[in-house]
Image (cartoon, coloured by chain):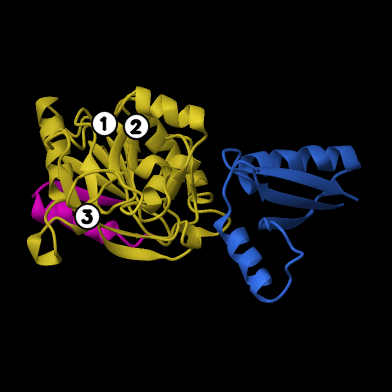
Amino acid sequence: MKFAIVVFPGSNCDHDAHHAAKHVLGQDAEFVWHKDASLGGADVVILPGGFAHGDYLRTGAIARFSPVMKSVKAFADAGGPVLGVCNGFQILLEAGLLPGAMLRNSGLKFICEHVSVRVEQTDTPFTGACRQGQVLRIPINHGEGNYFAPDDVLDRLERDRRVIFRYVDAATGEPTSAANPNGAARNIAGICSERRNVVGMMPHPERACEPILGSGDGLVLFESVVRALSAAGAVGTASR
Amino acid sequence: MKARVFVTLKPSVFDPQGRTIAEALHSMGYTGVGDVRQGKYFELEVDAKSAEEARTVVGDVADKLLANPVIESYRVEVD
């Protein structure tokens, strides 16, 4: 199975994602430069964290026009699994592949810490190996993770079970305001597309794939997509 | 032709930076200042034959790039 990790000028979690896919999971993984038109026959696409184009104008606002994004959109439209992490999530929002927008963290501080996120839904390619309600300890690392969408959009996301991760209290597993690090609407840490194959999340699972790094809880997302694609018969076929 | 674009957060969107600025002003003694909203300002040089044409181009640019319609609105001035 082949992972494509898109590299924008300013991406800085690309190597973490590559390491998780290739060295921790033993899958094929390749970097794809943002000016490339092709995803190189990948089975899964990751938009990594970082500061694409220096976050100029708005986070992800310039990156959405990178040539590779046309291929990412076509890949997503064809049902291919796409994971946007942190800045990758922000790019998916700007590109319109996911609804909503990011605002400055409510406390205005850049936050870098481990948080607890609850897996709300397991019927996405990236959460299939999770238990519903499972609480993962994964780091966040952002200044603009304050998820915003109009109330009607939020209601629709809830109704369609498209809220995939929520910030919760580590002890109770409940989405309290104290457990919300950035002011995100309804404690939302991650959502998915209507077809459920595109997932965006602020926490960094690729940085939590080995216990030596403080947590191995993020690995299950990568295991999920390997399992989902294996079931779909994509292993080694580089079908796209 | 010169165009100016003012991008602001929609009234329904909370602006933590604006509130922090307002609080700073209050602590400086400017108690008469109420709400503060922070925005962005762009100056564009546009090659256009008329103000209308420039306005159309700049509106297009603002829709596609300068403003995010989910959270922001904008106003264009041309001269």
Q: Are marks 1 and 2 in contact (CB under 8 Å)?
A: yes
Instruction: Of the two numbered discs 1 and 2 on the same chain, state the one appearing first in sequence.
Output: 2
A21 w.r.t. A236: above or below: below
Q: Colour of chain B?
A: blue
Same chain under badges 2 and 3? The reply is yes
Question: In this rendering, which labeled residue sits more in front, label 2 or label 3?
Answer: 3
Residue of label 1:
A240
In the rendering, which numbered label is found on residue A138?
A: 3
Quarter of image, res B34: bottom right
In the image: residue B53, left or right of residue A64: right
Q: Chain of mark 1?
A: A
Query: Can you identify the residue that label 2 sits on?
Result: A75
Q: CA distance from mark 1 to mark 3?
A: 31 Å
The residue located at (19%, 31%) in the rendering is A122
Question: What chain letter is assigned to the residue under label 3?
Answer: A
**Disc 3 on helix, strand or loop?**
strand
Which residue appears at 71% of the width and 75% of the height?
B29
